Image (tube, grey):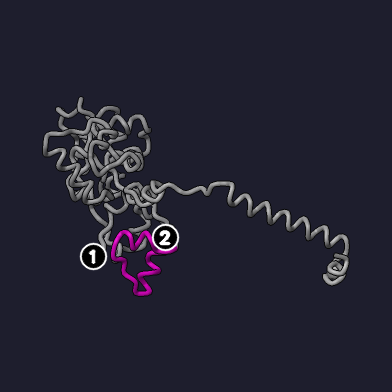
Amino acid sequence: MAGLKDWLGFNRRERRASLILIVLIGIVLLAKYLVPERKIPVDYYVLASSPETANKRVTGHFDPNSASYDDLIAAGLSPEQARGITAYREKGGRFRKAEDLGKIYSIDTATLRSIIPYILIRSETDSGKRLTELNSAVQDELEKLPGIGQVLAARIIRYRNLLGGFADPSQLGEVYGINDSLAARLRKFTEADTLLIRKLRINKASVEEMARHPYIGSENAPVIDGFRRRGYRFASYRDLAGTEGIKILKPELLRFYLDFSE
């Protein structure tokens, strides 16, 4: 034994360290066999690729009781989900609250949670009343809305002209002087026809025109113009939103205001 120690050339301290290392290795190997391996359930992988992930792209508000198939697709729902909603309505079904969309086979619980913030269901108590269409209403019509007088009606029209039109009644909350509670109340009495929106030709509009738009602003306008001067033409909303240096304001609404034609 002494000859072996001499051959290895270890001193007392080194022999002790080696012994500790051997003991630790033994503990690790023993633990590997004694402690069962923790496996990740298959459900984890199913969830990772489930509709919840897909529906994180939903960026548009919609009323499931009135939105067309194309409107639902534009809001970010999948074709299967849009077909399910329209088929449910065709059979006489009506969504009375956001959670009712869980009745649609293609919308599971996780998906429903992710899209609830974008679901706008107008109250049935006001269904018999004629809704005021915000993009065609004149000042006198707006003044008849609850909580809206001459001053606020004029502001609504000014802001409508600045935007190019309203895409959703919730935008009334952006008008100076209309607080959140009043805006929520007005949603029961108003609607917005997106076909009446005056769109901005993003590849042709001047810097001043872009800067005036509330959802583009003075910071994004020169950046967009810089790309155009270098010969770049934006082909879609996704193309614009994905361009470095452009910070989109109100992404869920801006898409209604852009025209990408040459």
Q: Which element type, helix, strand or loop, lies under badge 1?
A: loop
Left or right: where does residue 96 sit relative to residue 58?
left
For mark 2, does the 10 Å Cα neighbourhood hold few (<14), some (14 to 19), or many (20 or more) residues? some
Q: For the residue marked with disc 2, what is the amino acid?
A: Ile
Q: Residue at x 40, y 69 (%)?
A: 226
What residue is disc 1 on? Answer: 261
**Residue type, label 1:** Ser
Badge 2 marks a residue whose secondary structure is: loop
Spot the residue most to the bottom: 231
Q: Which residues are magenta?
A: 220-244
Quarter holding residue 5: bottom right
Residue 138 visible in this rendered orientation of the protein: no
Residue 180 to residue 58: above or below: above
Q: Decide which of 27, 242 is in the foreground and name it.
A: 27
Give yes or no for residue 84 being in the magenta stretch: no
Question: What distance separates the C-alpha of mark 1 from that of mark 2?
Answer: 20 Å
Mark 2 — residue? Answer: 246
Image quadrant holding the N terminus, namely bottom right
Q: Could you say where residue 150 lies in the image, as x and y percent from the top left? A: 28, 33
